[in-house]
Amino acid sequence: MSAVNNAAHYFLTANSPQGFVSRFSELSNVQDGWHMLILKGSPGCGKSTFIENLFLLLSHREPHPELIHCTADPTKLDAAVFPTLKFCVVDGTRPHSLEPRYPGVYEHTLDLSIYLNTDRLESYRDKIIALTNESEMTSKRAVRFVSAAGSLISDTYRMALEETDIGKIRKYAARLAAREMKPRAKGSGKEIPRLLSCVTQEGIMMFLDTPSVLCDRVCLIEDEYGSVNRLLLQALKDHALRAGYDVVTCYCPISPFEKLEHLFIPALRMGYMTSNHWHPITVSDCRTIHARRFLNLDALKTKKARIRFNRKASLELLGEAGKLIHEAKLIHDDLEAYYGNCMDFSELDTLAQGVAAKVLEKNPEIL
């Protein structure tokens, strides 16, 4: 969809060494009065378009909207989040299935397949089954390439970790936090996990406009090995949370539950971002932290050949994964065409307008 100036763009799923993983359950907080609309339905039934239409209807009432993009096809949306309205809408179908835990009071389900002409769809039965199986098989092949690349990247990380001065990093993080993160009156902050980059059909893709939405200042951490930035960002995250700041934590798609790549503190309009050969980042007039100050570089030189091999081979493997993701996307496009051929889209705009009206009814103070 077209860019919206105040929207932060993310992924929340990834083809990772652990398989296809989703962090959709962390989109919002059931304990904080949120409501989640879970969309159900077939491929090609208009879920992404419905999310986009709902976003356009609500974004002018939301100062901090988020758009969550599809990993398989970043031009499509998997979710839209409205923090001020305490509302989000999400595609809850495979492979990132979501089922209500608190139906009716937190999650609300809307099945768009009620507008499908199932009698007409039956004539495509064999083709739909074959395409579905082929798409899933191709996606699984892509994951195997990502997994192989992840093993090599992890090998480099472990070698670097052996030569990393962990104590020095912790002391540096404490000094940095003391200078930048003055304690707030309230209690601990909360973590908002997201993915800023992902392995897609176009290779490694990053939403480079999102940092400017979240912060005015960025500090770059240049780290080609992945040990220093991981430890430093984790320490800074812990300091920020203890000081009472909410943080947006962007994880590495190769290790989407463990390895931090970027950290943003919106209340301070401050961010810390990792720059390396996977995703080089250029920011004018910013501070740069060089990982080498925390590394035993002489010891790492003895492992230079192995590190070089890991880098070259992992890049090739991720390139092959991207080709397979593209292939799976084309197969899925054919699948969507069959379903879309049997779908009545005429009611979806009215349906989106009705949902938007209900959301705004619950938030009269922002009208």
Image: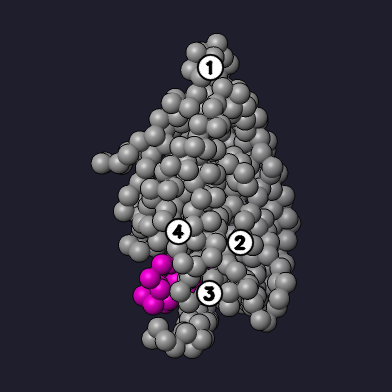
Describe the colour scheme in one phrase. one colour
Q: Quote the CA–CA distance across marks 2 and 3.
A: 13 Å
Q: Which residue is mark 3?
A: 87
Task: Answer whether labels 2 and 4 touch (C-beta < 8 Å).
Answer: no
Q: Quote the CA–CA distance across marks 3 and 4.
A: 29 Å
Relative to 39, 73 lies left or right: left
* Magenta-colored span: 50-65
Specify the label residue 26 is tagged with. Answer: 2
Give the prevailing secondary structure in the magenta stretch: helix
Q: Between residues 363 and 180, which one lies in front from this camera angle?
A: 180
Picture quarter containing residue 214? bottom left
Q: Which residue is mark 4?
A: 183
Residue ID at (58%, 36%): 321
Q: Which residue is mark 1?
A: 300
First of labels 2, 3 by sequence position: 2
First of labels 2, 1 by sequence position: 2
Residue ID at (66%, 39%): 17
